[in-house]
Image (spheres, helix red, strand yellow):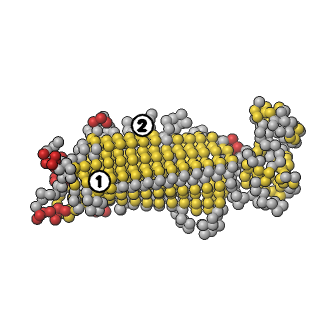
Amino acid sequence: MHSAAEAADAGEGHNPVSGVPAAHLSSLLKGEQDATEMMQQAINNYSRIVLPEGRFAIDTRTLVLRDGVQIVGAGQGRTIIQSKGTFGAFGILGADSGNGDVARNLKNIKISDLTIDGHVEELGYQPFTHLLSLHGVSDALIERVAFIGFRGDGIYLGSGVRAKQERHNLRVTIRDCVFDGIAKRNRNGLSCMDCDTLLVENSVFRNIGNPALSASVGAIDFEPNSKANIYRNVLIRNCKFSNIDTKNTAAITFFNGMQSGDNIKKLSVEDCTFENCYRGINASSKRKRPSSPADDVSVSNCHFSNSLVSDISLGGMSGVKIEGCSFESTPGNKSAKGGIVIGRAGKNCINAINWHIVNCTFASMTPSGGLFDIFGARGLEIRGNKLSDIAGVIFNFPPDKSSGSGRYLSDISISGNSISSGNKMGRAVTPFLFRIADDINSGGTNSLINSACRLSNNSFPSSIRFQPGGSKSALESGLALALPTSGTWYAGARVQVQRDHRWYVCSQPGTFGSLGDVTGDVSASSKLVANVRDPGAALRAGQVITVGDSQRHVVAAVDEDKMTLELDRPYAGKTMRAEKISWIPPVFKPQ
């Protein structure tokens, strides 16, 4: 206990202006007098400080917080702590444990029900003048606080104010707060260099950015400086991000470049909305392998609207699950692009590792590259998503700009997705299913989706087209004919499949002709439908086939499980959607 007075005020708290003469009280509460010394003395001597309605001007000295201190105001916009100068690297309010041992952290700091105003409009951008700076705290609670007009960051969760210092924050909660950059001459609403177990919930981030800066600016930025830094067990829940739209900003940025062991992992964003952001969720990530430590990133039940560049771009982060989210642009919005960027291009391609994009909806969007821009992936599932009114390419595999063989496109599954049109764009929408660049796989014949990407059970309408990046593109292997070298086979017979020179056991009888230039008849019921010529011995989505005697059609989709195909347009008065294929399915079992 610091004093007898503190003991007396332990219940209701200490009001630091209670002893101020009436002649000075009015100007003090209008922010016309410097309140720095009065506030610091209250922090030094009382555990609970209750501030009345009014403005408290803090000049050029940081208010240093101590263990267990609570500062409570009369409400946002009613009690205001306002900046009057520049505070160096520590900010207007700051706490520093002085060492890297979490057992010696400052504990139970609480700030609530007030506004902290950095006056960026009058004082201008200053990257290291933060509103609240915490280094080495445990169980801190910041709730119902408005961080307004910050010149640097609203809150900085740091690892020391000087280079090579080590501090670790533990169990920090930020709840029901507002972060408003006002003039967009800021750094970040919340910067996290180090925090193990961080909860940010029910908070609003708006008008944050700085067109003069190139990167790492936005609402929430995770930016460790060394492998000693930790950020893990992060949950951002039920927050709203809006107008984070100046160039190179992002509502949330994750950086895993300092990952070593388990210091960076388990990052969750739930039930949040992102409106008018340059990028929604972004990552600057290092190149990883499937065996590397997983980031474990989850984005669930979030809503993204009118993103200028991308909704989600998590580079090469690993163990990513995007589930139950909705993505849209306002019909007629010509600046919004959006979409999900998977992997990252550059001199050294960074591959996404083990991603799952499931049960999401996409509506009224015009992506600049593809709705799914797949630069590199080692394990990618896109399943159960519903797409409506997409103008442009759905699945884009852009050119390989990396040097060497660093790009991977492997273990990709696209299943159970549907595409429809609700005519909400106010104009004709012409989506393209795939665009695949010729230079994938070192410029050879593009067998990407034959070998690395499997499609099944998707509902893609006949109006959607395949847009090749060049003449070498080919699509889904679908119903491989799996032919013997000649003539006839029987159930139980051993069949050598030419394409992989392996022996199989047939489950059904069948016949086919020469493999020199594969020719086969496809029929629906008893009616001849298609005459297929394909030296690769497969029926694929995106393939041009001859129907009947002369009509050329494009195969829009093949469903191997149901033994059906869909053509790009009707034939002989039939829609040719989900038509039965008569030949033997690829149910040969390796012997």
Percent coordinates x, y for residue 285 in the rendering: 48, 43
For disc 1, the neighbor class at 10 Å (few under 14, some 14 to 19, many from 20) is many
**Nearer the camera: disc 2 or disc 1:** 1
Residue at numbered disc 2? 263
Q: Can residue 358 be seen at all in this image of the molecule? A: yes
Q: Are marks 2 and 1 in contact (CB under 8 Å)?
A: no
Q: Quadrant of residue 250?
A: bottom left
Circle 2: element type = loop
Give the quadrant of the N terminus.
Answer: top left
Residue at the far top: name it.
Answer: 591
Percent coordinates x, y for residue 317 in the rendering: 51, 43
Residue 391 relative to residue 550: left or right: left
Percent coordinates x, y for residue 303 in the rendering: 50, 57
Residue at numbered disc 1? 112
Percent coordinates x, y for residue 339 in the rendering: 55, 55
Q: Quadrant of residue 86?
A: bottom left
Residue plotted at (69% across, 41% down) = 451
In front: 246, or 243?
A: 243
For disc 2, the neighbor class at 10 Å (few under 14, some 14 to 19, many from 20) is many
Circle 1: element type = strand
Residue at the far right: name it.
Answer: 487
Q: Can residue 87 be seen at all in this image of the molecule? A: no
Amino acid type, callout 1 = Ser
Residue plotted at (86% across, 36% down) = 490
Amino acid type, callout 2 = Asn
